[in-house]
Amino acid sequence: MAAIKPMISVEYVGNATVVRFTDEKILEEKDIKILQDSIMPIIESASGGINLILDFGNVQYLSSAVLGLLIRVSKRIYENDGRLRLCSINPKIYEIFKITRLTKTFDIYKDIESAAEDLS
Amino acid sequence: MVPKAPTICSIVVESKPSAVVEICKQIMAKLEANRFGKDDIFAVHLTLEEAFLNAVKHGNKMDPTKKVAVEYSVDSEKVEIAITDEGSGFEPDAIADPRFGEKLFEPGGRGLLLMNSYMDVVEYNQRGNRVRMVRYREKPDFTKSRSGMKT
């Protein structure tokens, strides 16, 4: 597993790239900018469309600005013919996705294994 | 020991996103001292971040010369937070619902929805530059007083 920036780690499971958020809180604008600057090059550097899994297992708090980041990441992936899956979202964070109806937009899986299986 | 009298605090801070960290720390400590549960703490943390960022970004337009005023009180029953910026205000009803149509795919515009979802009271002054939010620890059961039904 290779640490790219303090806020994410990257690993590969099957044909999927797994980006794990390592921080418990993702709230501040500057943090979200760092995340975006870390994730977008991973998408761009993939040959062909990337199969990306975003792992929220460590995340206990996030703000609506993170949802904005996810929308931007999602658009970039689909522009590049890739696929995006989210996983390991704790119940409180999942509630935010439900309230905002983003459960209709994102494919959310219980864990990395089930997300990777869907992408295989 | 749970304090009986409400703790009322008033702070004026620099208009920058990171200024919310210290305020958040203070309010979370008060919630814990008053034995609020994890759901309450999560809800207040989230809405405080959203409301403060709105004040800095949309109210004060990231102007570092401006200030944000935060007043809060916490007692064993409820937490109340008011945030005032120096902007010209906004009309909450004019904000489109981010859950439907094209808005669902836009990066922004979900902060007010989350504030309204997690707090029991969210109200603005006439100018629209001050928001007051309340979350009750135990939700009042209005159906009891209205219908006299026992649950």
Image: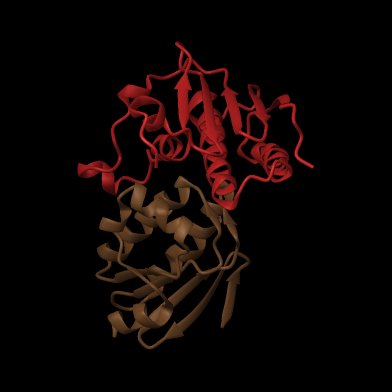
Chain colours: A brown, B red
Image coordinates of residue B88 in percent, x first then y, are: 48, 15
Q: Nearer the viewer, residue A47 or B31?
A: B31
Identified at 34% across, 47% down, the residue is: A100
Q: Which part of the image, by quadrant, shows the N terminus of chain A?
A: bottom right
Instruction: Tell me how many marks there are.
Output: 0
Residue situated furthest top in the rendering: B126
Q: Establish if B147 lies above or below B25.
A: above
Image-based side of B89 in relation to A49, left or right: right
State which quadrant residue B70 falls in: top right
Query: Closer to the camera, B130 or B34?
Result: B34
Q: Is residue A43 above or below residue B59?
A: below
**Residue at position x 30%, y 40% from top?**
B98
At a point 56% along the width and 67% down the height, the residue shown is A58
Q: Quadrant of the C terminus of chain A?
A: bottom left
Residue B76 point in image, percent of width and height: 66, 35
Residue A101 located left or right of residue B129: left
Residue B143: which quarter of the image?
top left
Taking A10 as reference, is B92 left or right? Answer: left
Name the residue at 53% across, 39% down.
Answer: B138
The spot of residue A83 in percent (x, y) is 29, 71
Residue positioned most to the right = B1
Q: Residue placed farthest to the bottom in the image?
A: A14
Q: Is residue A65 above or below residue A6?
A: above
Q: Is residue A32 left or right of residue B27?
A: left
The percent coordinates of residue A67 (x first, y second) are 41, 51
